[in-house]
Amino acid sequence: MITTPAAVARKPKPPRLGRSDRSTIGLWFWEIDRMLLLLVMVLISIGLIAVAAASPASTHRYSDVSFQLAPLHYFWRQLMWVCLGFPAMIAVSMLPQHVARRGALVAAGFFLLCLAAVPLVGVEANGARRWLGVGISQFQPSEFLKPAYVVAMAWLLSLRAQDASLPVVPLSGLVTGVIAILLMMQPDFGKMMIFAASRLAMVMVRACPGAGLAFWRAAAALA
């Protein structure tokens, strides 16, 4: 049987978002952790509700006769960042693994340098120096460093599987210690504990994957 170009052209395409759809969106749709995505959306919703509840009191505190903030000023600002961050999160989740890893390593190095610059040229507010000014806006390097740090530390600890002689645990401790010192100079004890707990959890999972998974399941059940 001879297949003509017309027959090839009439070959049906795989259904959109079907199991046979090998496009970037199709692969993402079937491979994404839907439960994790749902939990992220729930946390975002809870955060928006909390900001909406606290916004009127905060705007009243920072308003005076000459300067008035809308009661939901901080809620709308938080919602703006959610509208920017959520699509960015989806876009990053579609990246190939090696591209996402390289991007996280570059981001970790860049924001670590930004974190080191905070004590020198950071903006002080309410007794803490945690922000860097960029034009008319400000950003907190530690917030951007958190996700990049987790990916970078996971990659570093995974190198032990390729070469058992690599001192990956001490190196991860050294990097985390530098971050902790920089955070305590701001000071930001809460962020420091988040980085330390993240490293501890990853070291536990690397050392004993079964025990690590059991720990996280028990923590989720207690929560």
Image (tube, rainbow, N blue to C red):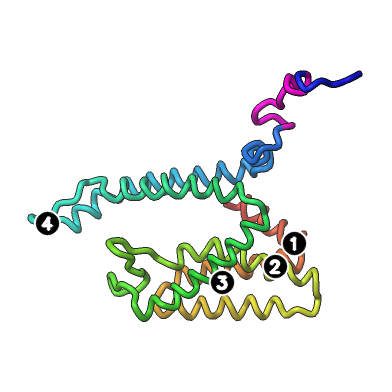
Mark 4, residue position: 64
Q: Nearer the viewer, mark 2 or mark 4?
A: 4
Please name the residue shown 39% across and 46% down the image.
Answer: 48
Residue 209 in the image: state x and y as whole percent.
76, 61
> Given the image, on which type of amino acid does mark 1 rest?
Ala
Q: Earlier in the sequence, mark 2 or mark 1?
A: 2
| Residue tagged 2 | 204
Q: Magenta residues, as a range? A: 7-20
Residue in the foreground of this view, choosing between 83 and 215: 83
Task: Please say if the residues under marks 2 and 1 sit with CB atoms less than 8 Å apart.
Answer: yes
Numbered circle sitting on residue 196: 3
Q: Mark 3 vs mark 1: give the one in front.
A: 3
Cα distance between the residues tagged 1 and 4: 55 Å
Q: Quadrant of residue 90?
A: top right
- Give the CA distance from mark 2 to mark 4: 51 Å
Does the magenta run of residues contain 15? yes
Does the magenta segment cover residue 203?
Answer: no
In terms of sequence position, does the residue under pointer 3 or pointer 2 come before the other? Answer: 3
Residue at image location 47% in from the left, 75% down from the top:
113
Mark 3 Cα within 10 Å, few/some/many (few <14, many 20+)? some
Could you tell me how far apart the alpha carbons at marks 3 and 1 are, in whole angstroms?
A: 19 Å
What label sits on residue 211 in the rendered view? 1
**Front in this rendered view, residue 120 or 102:** 102
- Picture quadrant where residue 58 is located: bottom left
> Earlier along the polypeptide chain: callout 3 or callout 4?
4
In the shown orientation, is residue 65 left or right of residue 148?
A: left
Q: Are marks 3 and 4 in contact (CB under 8 Å)?
A: no
Dot 4: few (<14), some (14–19), or many (≥20) neighbours within 10 Å? few
Q: Amino acid at mark 4?
A: Asp
